[in-house]
Image (cartoon, rainbow, N blue to C red):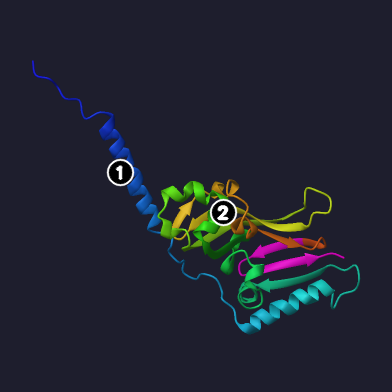
């Protein structure tokens, strides 16, 4: 009776699995360095100066009596002009940052950083899976979600405006937003948290505009 061959065994299976993993890595890596197209309002130098003036008036209480709530509206183009022209690189966790204010109270943040800054202390662990030349390459990130006011857990902690990320992209590749919960502390997490004054009462996001209310 002739012998029936059942295959090449574990060796062939291993080769197939490794081949699929390599193919998946190549497919994913082909898009992680893509630069996203601009979808936000860029703003002009005048918009940046206007945003500065509004924030100054809000902080100083100009034009209102003591005890009255103070409200300002910052438009998307003003926020982006402020980020681009009036804040230094040391103040910003991401390079070339931009903000988009979308319907449904959604905020979208984009910016770039070197790949090694994304992984931080993890770089040594993941380095064997990526080409060495990639470590210093800038990648574009897009973070999308809703913002909320957050009070510090400990007494004396600063109040913060926090972006609860619901969608995340690296280049043109979408990643699970849950990955942010296991990343080491670094520029990506800092880009989702902004310290605000304790007197800030509410922050409302509408398409193209951000309304801030402070109570004395």
| Mark linked to residue 19 | 1
User: Within the magenta stretch, is there residue 214?
Assistant: yes
Tell me what residue is drawn at x 56 percent, y 46 percent: 178
CA neighbours of label 2 inside 10 A, class few (<14), some (14 to 19), many (20+): some
Q: Is residue 32 visible?
A: no
Magenta segment boundaries in residue numbering: 202-216
Depth check, front residue: 188 or 54? 188
Q: Secondary structure at mark 2?
A: helix
Depth check, front residue: 182 or 42? 182
Establish if 17 lies above or below 103: above
Question: Residue 193: x percent and y percent?
Answer: 67, 58
**The C terminus sits in image quarter:** bottom right
Tell me what residue is drawn at x 57 percent, y 68 percent: 95
| Mark linked to residue 120 | 2
Question: Residue 185: x percent and y percent?
Answer: 63, 52
Q: Secondary structure at mark 1?
A: helix
């Amino acid at each position: 009776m002739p012998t029936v061959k059942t295959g090449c065994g574990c060796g062939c299976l291993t080769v197939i699995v490794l081949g699929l993993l390599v193919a998946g890595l190549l497919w994913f890596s082909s898009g992680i360095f893509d630069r996203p197209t601009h979808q936000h309002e860029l703003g002009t130098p005048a918009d940046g100066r206007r945003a500065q003036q509004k924030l100054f008036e809000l902080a100083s209480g100009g034009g209102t009596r003591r005890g009255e709530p103070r409200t300002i509206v910052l438009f998307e183009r003003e926020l982006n002009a402020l980020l681009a022209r009036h804040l230094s690189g040391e103040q910003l966790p991401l390079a070339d940052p931009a903000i988009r204010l979308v319907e449904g109270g959604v905020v979208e943040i984009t910016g770039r950083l070197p790949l090694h800054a994304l992984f931080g202390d993890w770089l040594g662990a993941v380095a064997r899976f990526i080409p060495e030349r990639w470590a210093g390459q800038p990648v574009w990130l897009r973070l999308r979600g809703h913002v909320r006011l957050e009070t510090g857990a400990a007494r004396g902690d600063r109040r913060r405006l926090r972006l609860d990320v619901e969608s995340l992209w690296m280049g043109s590749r979408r990643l699970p937003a849950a990955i942010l919960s296991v990343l080491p502390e670094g520029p990506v997490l800092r880009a989702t948290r902004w310290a605000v004054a304790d007197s800030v009462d509410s922050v409302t996001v509408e398409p193209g505009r951000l309304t801030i209310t402070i109570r004395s």
